[in-house]
C-alpha cells in the first residue's frame, strides 16, 4: 500500500521567513514524488517533482529515502506563495496518491 | 484554452438521482484519470484510462460508479442512485504516456457535486 502524510493542515509564516512543508511517505518500492499547488480559485497544478531536481518559484524538495520524506522548502516566503500544497506519490501504477494538503499562509 | 475541461462545473441533485459528468482531456494525451476530493482531504484516485481501455479502478469505488472513454478522447463518469456521501469535487486529469514513468498529470477545474 502507498500512503502520503502531511502532518500540518496550516502553516502560517511571515513574508521573508523560510518555509518548510513536510511530507512523509510509505511505499515499499521506488516511488516518484511530486508537489502540487492550488492557488485560490485555480485548478491543481504541478509545482515540482523529485526526478527533475529543479527549483520552481524558489521552491526545492529533496527525496530522502532513509527518512521517507520529501519536504518542500523555500528560503524566503512571498505573499504569492499563499496556497494549498499537496504532496503526491506515484508507485508502479500510474495513479497518484495524495496527502491531505497543507495550507500555507504568508502574512506581512 | 487548451487545458483539461470539465462539465458541468457544478451539479446539485436529489438523493437517488443519476448524474453524469464529462471530461475533455488535453488533445494529445492518451491517459485520463478521475479523482474525487472531499473537504479537508487530498484528491483520491477513482479510475484511469489509457486510450479507451479502463486499466485500473479503485477498490473503494462503489458499483454505482461507472466511467467510459469510448473513443479514447473525452470521458464520462456516471453515478447512479446518488447518496449524500457522494457529495464531493470530482477531478479529471490527463497525461501523455511517453513510455516512462515521468508523465505529468494536468488537472481540470473539477465538477462540484452536491447531493441533497
Image (tube, coloured by chain):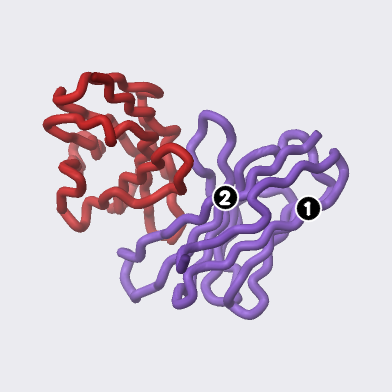
Chain colours: A red, B purple
User: Outermost residue toward the left?
Assistant: A75
Query: Residue at the spot x=59%, y=35% of the render?
Result: B38
Check the image and report above or below for B5 versus A71.
below
- Label 2–label 1 contact, CB within 8 A: no
Which residue occupies the foreground of this view, A48 or A4? A48
**A107 and A18: which is toward the camera:** A107
Q: Is residue B79 left or right of residue B38?
A: right
Instruction: Kindly identify which chain the residue marked by label 1 belongs to.
Output: B
- Counting from the top left corner in percent of width and height, residue A33 is at 30, 48
Q: Which mark is residue B19?
A: 1
Which numbered circle lies on residue B112?
none
Residue A87 in the image: state x and y as whole percent. Answer: 35, 41
Q: Residue A9: give x, y in percent of width and height.
A: 40, 23
Vertical placement of A5 versus B53: above or below?
Answer: above
Q: Position of residue B66 (x, y in %)?
A: 72, 59
Label 2 sits on residue: B110
Q: Is residue B13 visible from the viewing direction of this image? A: yes
| Tally of numbered discs | 2
Q: Is residue B55 above or below residue A86?
A: below
Q: Quadrant of the C terminus of chain A?
A: top left
What residue occupies the far bottom of the structure in this picture? B71
Residue at (46, 48) in percent of width and height? A43
* Chain identifier of the residue bearing label 2 in the image: B
Amino acid at each position: 500500500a502507498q500512503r502520503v502524510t502531511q502532518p500540518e493542515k496550516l502553516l502560517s509564516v511571515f513574508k521573508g521567513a523560510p518555509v518548510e512543508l513536510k511530507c512523509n511517505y510509505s511505499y515499499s518500492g521506488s516511488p516518484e514524488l511530486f508537489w502540487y499547488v492550488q492557488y485560490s480559485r485555480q485548478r491543481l497544478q504541478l509545482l515540482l517533482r523529485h526526478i527533475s531536481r529543479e527549483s520552481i518559484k524558489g521552491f526545492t524538495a529533496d527525496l530522502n529515502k532513509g527518512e521517507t520524506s520529501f519536504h518542500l522548502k523555500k528560503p524566503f516566503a512571498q505573499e504569492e506563495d499563499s496556497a494549498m500544497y499537496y504532496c503526491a506519490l506515484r508507485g508502479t501504477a500510474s495513479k497518484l496518491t495524495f496527502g491531505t494538503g497543507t495550507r500555507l499562509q504568508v502574512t506581512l | 484554452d487548451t487545458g483539461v475541461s470539465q462539465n458541468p462545473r457544478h451539479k446539485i441533485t436529489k438523493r437517488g438521482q443519476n448524474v453524469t459528468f464529462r471530461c475533455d482531456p488535453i488533445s494529445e494525451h492518451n491517459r485520463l484519470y478521475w479523482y474525487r476530493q472531499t473537504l479537508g482531504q487530498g484528491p483520491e484516485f477513482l479510475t484511469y484510462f489509457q486510450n479507451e481501455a479502463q486499466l485500473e479502478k479503485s477498490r473503494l469505488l462503489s458499483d454505482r460508479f461507472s466511467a467510459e472513454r469510448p473513443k479514447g478522447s473525452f470521458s464520462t463518469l456516471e453515478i447512479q442512485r446518488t447518496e449524500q456521501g457522494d457529495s464531493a469535487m470530482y477531478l479529471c486529469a490527463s497525461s501523455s504516456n511517453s513510455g516512462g514513468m515521468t508523465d505529468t498529470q494536468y488537472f481540470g477545474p473539477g465538477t462540484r457535486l452536491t447531493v441533497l
